[in-house]
Image (cartoon, rainbow, N blue to C red):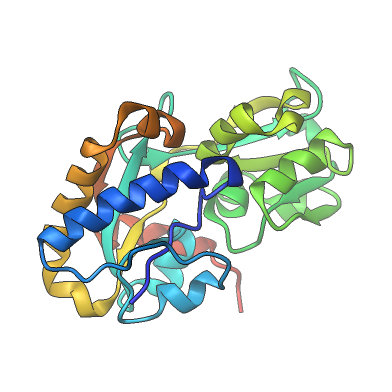
Amino acid sequence: MFASLPMYDWPEVQAANDQFWESLRQHLADIGVDAPATLTRGEDPWTHWLNPSLCLSQTCGLPFSAKLSGKAVLLGAPDYQLPDSPKGQYRSVIIAREAGAEIMDLSGARFAYNMRESQSGWAALDKVLQIESHFGDLVQSGAHRASIEAVAEGRADCAAIDAVSWALAQRHEPAAASVHMIAVTPPTPGLPFITGQANEGKAKQMIDAVTMAIAALPLDVRDTLALRGFKAWTDADYAPLAAGWPKE
């Protein structure tokens, strides 16, 4: 039995995530879901996502649609305070070092991405603009924050950043002040909360519990995490994203 919230657990917001987990844990306990006292950090998230005894975790829409659907139980996605995004959805923010740059003029430029299996860091932009054909050098950074730093430091010319990570960066990452948003991708369902197959029979109750746990958070915690609510999604909502998974 374990739980993790690895996708937006920046050091600056870990205390808020711990408070979020405490609210989640209490509401899950109310419906008879056995929840650990603390979040698990620092482990390979795939070991959590694929474990039938998982209490709760958050993954990315691309790995969920391509590898986890049918192996983990989808609950839905948090609704973050994102401009111009429907409830429970998000976009990729395209950043560049030069203000006013046009993405079509960046042909042959160096493109930074967190990982090839990322919906926001790769697949969302690749769907509308074939990355490997359009850009030159491809710089794998390993994390959205590291991609922002790579662009700011001149090791890359542009990058695709998860809109929630971009919002966190504007608050906590100094390098964000040295780059500029030049475009956004179309919205897709946000990063999903999942549970293990052992909890499949309680999925509807868990959705209600997560919704109530978010509403019960102090306003300052919700503001720190940019949490506004929760939207239930189905596996079918994420299914179209699977086409972005790297070809094997």
Q: Is residue 242 above or below residue 50?
A: above
In the picture, which quadrant includes the N terminus?
Answer: bottom left
User: Which image quadrant is residue 57 in?
Assistant: bottom left
Residue at the far front: name it: 37
Position of residue 4 relative to residue 223, above or below, is below
Q: Is residue 85 above or below residue 125?
A: above
Q: Nearer the viewer, residue 155 or 52?
A: 52
Look at the image and tell me whether residue 219 can be seen: yes
Quarter of the image with the C terminus is bottom right
Q: Position of residue 106 (x, y in %)?
A: 80, 35
The residue that appears at 76% across and 32% down in the rendered structure is: 175
In this rendering, position of residue 96 left or right of residue 67: right
Q: Measured from the top left, where is residue 90 in percent x and y? A: 43, 39
**Residue 36 vs residue 152: left or right?**
left
Mark yes or no: residue 190 visible: no
Residue 40 lies, in percent from the top left, at 46, 67
Residues 132 and 233: in front is: 233
Quarter of image, res 148: top right
Q: Residue furthest top?
A: 100
Q: Is residue 82 above or below residue 64?
A: above
x then y, percent, for residue 207: 18, 54
Q: How many marks?
A: 0
In percent of the image, x 75 and y 27: which residue is there?
A: 179
Q: Residue at x 36, y 55 (%)?
A: 192
What residue lies at 75% left-to-right and 54% top-to-bottom? 141
As drawn, is 160 to the left or to the right of 84? right
